[in-house]
Image: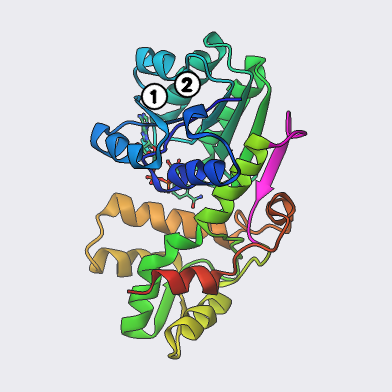
Amino acid sequence: MSFVVTGATGQLGRLIVTHLLSRGIAPADIVAAGRNSGKVDALQSLGVRTAVIDYSDPATLAAAFDGADTLMLVSGSDVGGRVEQHRNAIDAAKTAGISRIAYTSAPRADDTDLILAPEHKATEQYLRASGVPFTILRNNWYTENYASSLSQAAETGVYAASTGEGRVASASRDDFAEAAAVVLTTEGHEGKTYELGGDVAWTGSEFAATLGSVLGREVRFESLTPDAHTAALLAAGLDEGTAGFVVGLDANIATGALDSTSNDLSTLLGRPTTPAAATLATLQA
Ligand SMILES: NC(=O)c1ccc[n+]([C@@H]2O[C@H](COP(=O)([O-])OP(=O)(O)OC[C@H]3O[C@@H](n4cnc5c(N)ncnc54)[C@H](OP(=O)(O)O)[C@@H]3O)[C@@H](O)[C@H]2O)c1
């Protein structure tokens, strides 16, 4: 069984490669693929085969996927251009005779207001229609997304967001990566769509308390209106587009887009998910 992992130059993909290795997959049976050739070269230290690919360049995908059995398609980061890119990858996999594709998607991608979901929904639809056996990994938020909240809280004692009482079922990147490796290397996942998230879905005030416990200082939740949040982000130097994006995501969280009671992640891992406090502790300088 041989595997291609795209996005391997990124944080999640690299962890998926290391989990495949620790699950006993031979380095020669893994192609770690990424776009940046310098970062791809650095992956050679893992002993695996490597490939430079661009989702926008089908010839690079055909070369990298040739001879592989299973594709781990890590969603790209070119927001707005990903549907065509992901279609290219699915088409190339089908042409190469790949027998299973796992894809990293977004929570409830086909039934959510989450502003990031439409590209994932379109990719899922294309994948389902491709005829290639698939598994969809709908990853909730990485706890690591909150690294800047940790450093801000360390300075100010405040965690500010416009998420209201909304909950986030975050887990560590490593949890999501390990679950992906489990899916890639074990049977019974074909046609499945997993809603992957942490065992605990936390509110802003609960998260502030967690930040406080990690930092050893009091941290209070400042619950902002969307307008006040936008104004604060602009005052902090963010451009209008980025501020609008952040506030839009918080609005999604406020209405439950990242709330989840699924235990798919801990079930795949065979253990509880990593608590947010443990992940945040690793991010402290
Ligand atoms: N669940 C979450 O909280 C969350 C948060 C952020 C992102 N995501 C999604 O999850 C994915 C993985 O997360 P991550 O933290 O590992 O992100 P990351 O570190 O930014 O890695 C993104 C990976 O995608 C590759 N990539 C982007 N565009 C590409 C293209 N056109 N062709 C080929 N490769 C391309 C990058 O390659 P190079 O680095 O070599 O260019 C990199 O390996 C992201 O790409 C995004 O879709 C999820």
Task: Count the numbered circles shown.
Answer: 2
The answer to whether marks 1 and 2 mark residues whose Cβ atoms lie closer than 8 Å is yes
Residue depicted at 47% across the width and 79% down the height = 211
Residue 8, given in percent of the width and then of the height, sits at: 41, 38
Q: Determine which residue is flagged by label 1.
A: 55
Between 63 and 112, the one lying in front of the other is 63
Asked if residue 82 lies left or right of residue 118, the reply is left
In space, the residues marked 1 and 2 are separated at their CA atoms by 6 Å
Tell whether 229 sits left or right of 182.
Answer: left
> Looking at the image, is 179 positioned above or below residue 120?
below
Snapshot colouring: rainbow
Q: Check if residue 244 falls in the magenta segment.
A: no
Q: Residue at x 36, y 40 (%)?
A: 9
Q: Which residues are magenta?
A: 186-198
Q: Residue at x 47, y 28 (%)?
A: 28
Locate the N terminus and report the quarter of the image it occupies: top right
Q: Horizontal and vertical percent for residue 196?
A: 65, 50
Q: Amino acid at mark 1?
A: Tyr
Task: Quickly name the residue at label 2.
Answer: 89
Secondary structure, magenta segment, majority class: loop
Q: Is residue 110 visible?
A: no
Secondary structure of the residue carrying tag 1 is loop
Q: State whether label 1 is within 8 Å of ligand 1.
A: yes
* Left or right, 57 with reference to 119: left
